Amino acid sequence: MKIAVVDADPIVRDFVVGTLMYSVNREVLPFKDGLDAWIYFEDYGVPDIIVADVNLEELTGTELLGKVKGLNQGTIVILYSDLPEKEAMVREAGADAFLAKPFGVNELFTLVQRFVVEGQSSN
Amino acid sequence: MIRLGAEPSKMREIELDDVFLSRLQLLIVMAKAYLSGYPLGRHRIKSILENANHIKLEAVGLEEDLEWFKDDASFSDNLGFDNAFYQRVKLLSVMAEAIAKGHVLESHKKEALEKNLNAVCESITFNKQVSDMQFLKVA
């Protein structure tokens, strides 16, 4: 199980990475923008789960979602934003989940339960 | 698509205080999971150490802020600072660090940890039960 977190804000990114790393006891890959993440995915393969901010430089969260789903439809993509108007765009782009900021540990634990624990048991 | 987090009318950026509170809640879950006997793994240990360190640094900063404002009662009252709370938070971060470093806590220390956890939880009204998080059983 490979998980990646993409966020330009190191404070939020480190918090999300730390919470997910603790929950699943696996390494979680951090990226500061969508393009960096995409270059890495092209070289080393797309992770099973990607958690990303919608508002990213170079390659936005929804653009990254389109590229990732184009390569591997099975990858779970979870996008978050502080702007309500982004929710419909994220839904239309085909995200598996939308996290409305501000969110905390409970929401991240729910995602792990839904996509890691229940995801594994349904496979 | 599932939706989680703030209601549309309450959506906003995540502030430093939000991250501090979320990290503190995570530290509480980490300590409760230890007391409940959930397994630790390499990445969990790394995550506990990073989180404990972050909370310790933030708590020290907040304590220094409190020291600065201690002679101005009206100011400190308005800020809602509580010295005992930050001391408890700092103690919790030290205890979590000890757990992650593999120190075995004897029963009286576990009892102290539990009392400290309860006091911190009460202050921030956080009542997450680790039994709700089945994924913690697998390291």
Image: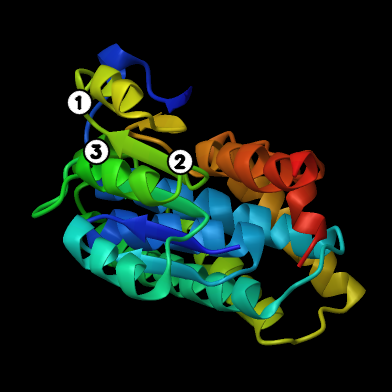
Which badge, 3 or 2, is on the more N-terminal residue? 3
Q: Chain of mark 1?
A: A
For image coordinates 53% across by 72% down, the residue present is: A27
The secondary element bearing badge 3 is classed as helix
Crowd rating for badge 3 (residues with CA inside 10 Å; few <14, some 14–19, many 20+):
many
The secondary element bearing badge 2 is classed as loop
Q: Type of residue at label 1? A: Leu
Residue B127 in view: yes
Which badge, 1 or 2, is on the more N-terminal residue? 1
Residue B17 in view: no
Q: Nearer the viewer, residue A22 or B66?
A: A22
Q: Chain of mark 3?
A: A
Please, is residue A59 above or below residue B89 in the view? above
Label 3 close to label 2 by CB (< 8 Å):
no
Please, is residue B70 above or below residue B134 in the view? below
Please, is residue B40 above or below residue A84 in the view? below
**Residue farthest to the top, as pictured:** B9
Position of residue A51 measured from the top left corner of the image (x, y, whole percent): 40, 49
The quadrant of the picture occupied by the N terminus of chain A is bottom right
Crowd rating for badge 1 (residues with CA inside 10 Å; few <14, some 14–19, many 20+):
some
Position of residue A97 measured from the top left corner of the image (x, y, whole percent): 45, 31
Residue located beneath label 2 in the image: A104
Residue located beneath label 3 in the image: A62
Please, is residue B4 above or below residue B54 in the view? above
